[in-house]
Image (tube, rainbow, N blue to C red):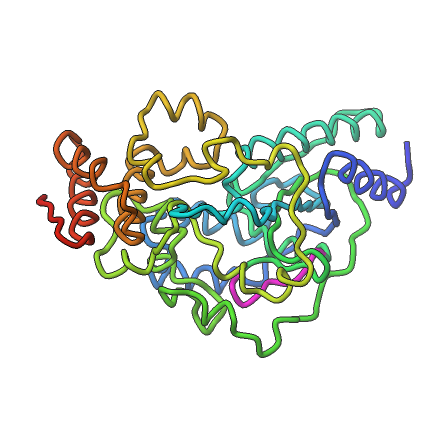
Amino acid sequence: MLQASALAQYLKTSAAALGFDLAGITRPTAVRHHSVFNAWVAAGRHGAMGYLATERALEVRRDPRRLYPACRSILVVAANYAPAPQYQTAPWQMDLAAYALGQDYHEVLSDRLRRLVADLEAQVGRPVGHRIYTDTGPVMERELAQQAGLGWIGRNTCLIHPRRGSYLFLAEVLLDLDLPSDPPFKPDRCGSCRRCVEACPTGCILPDRTLDARRCISYLTIELRGRIPLELRPAIGSWGFGCDLCQQVCPWNLCFATPTGDPAFQPPALLRWPRALDFLRLTPEKIQLDLRHSPLRRARRSGLVRNAAIVAGNLRDPAAPPALAVLLERETDPDLREAAAWALGRFPGKSGQT
């Protein structure tokens, strides 16, 4: 069996071979920002994401060992998902968050980490107790990543690496192995820059470096069910699923982010130049066929069609009114009919009714 330091290096080398761009190791300790998270929940800024506010979720986030008592070290990895510019240039295009252009990262990263653990077990000659997470459990991922030396938590709440930017998927493996830690990343390199704050059309980035999710376009277009508040719809602009505005203006991305070459994160045909019109006509069968392994499934058909209607109204896509009219007349979901009526009302000479 390798010594602990050699085993830690083996893990990082294996992670790179599996497609991870960054890897670091930290100890399971009490989470420093747990009180900030609790205050954020207490203020109701998590919106309708009730799973964040359960008693168990709040308690477990306090310390990774409450989630996995046998944990002695944590491997934190990151994978680049920065988009290629040509995916954002077509006329009347509906914008999608870059993380959602490829396959579902939960599936991709978890599968890679399971392979990594299998390789690790071959090295140590025994089963290794572990838990794998990638935005799938009550884990303070960005804080763990900072403790493992992968970057700092920026003003926009994203983890930022000084040579790779912030288009990074994060994942963790809680291990029962005692491995040496990497030094934490201590500098805050956002400085006085406020480009992300100024770019946010809904003003969801708060002075305490948290987000009011209730105003965040990503929350509104992904997590929120039902109707999006009327006063926030124009600010959604062309974003049909998620939002990258605070990342697009970040100097660390403008200078250092490079498009991912990972085959798993390349967009299928439907998502290369998406248009609201394509999503207004979305059927359950098309979701199953074209979006089977896509993160877009999280918003469900109701959310995707609702969002497409709002985008069509904001962009005033000249091809959209007939599809909106069909939606208004034939759709059984009252929230989708309302969104279609609102969108039709954004076109000169058009009107709709709920």
The front one of 176 and 189 is 189
The front one of 207 and 279 is 279
Query: Can residue 151 be found in the magenta stretch?
Result: yes
Q: Residue 99 location in percent, x, y? A: 53, 44
| Quarter in which the N terminus is drawn | top right
| Residue lying farthest to the left in this orientation | 353
Total labels drawn = 0
| Quarter in which the C terminus is drawn | top left
**Magenta residue span:** 150-157
Residue at horizontal 38 percent and vertical 41 percent from the top: 275
| Residue lying farthest to the bottom in this orientation | 192
Q: Is residue 235 left or right of residue 210?
A: left
Residue at horizontal 45 percent and vertical 74 percent from the top: 207
Query: Can residue 256 be found in the magenta stretch?
Result: no
Please identify the dominant SS of the magenta region.
loop
What is the quadrant of residue 2 in the picture?
A: top right
Q: Is residue 304 left or right of residue 23?
A: left
254 w.r.t. 261: above or below: below
194 w.r.t. 271: above or below: below
Q: Residue 84 location in percent, x, y? A: 60, 46
Q: Is residue 276 left or right of residue 66?
A: left
What is the quadrant of residue 284 in the picture?
A: top left
The front one of 349 and 208 is 349
Residue at horizontal 46 percent and vertical 40 percent from the top: 273
Q: Residue 302 location in percent, x, y? A: 28, 35
Q: Residue 112 location in percent, x, y? A: 68, 31
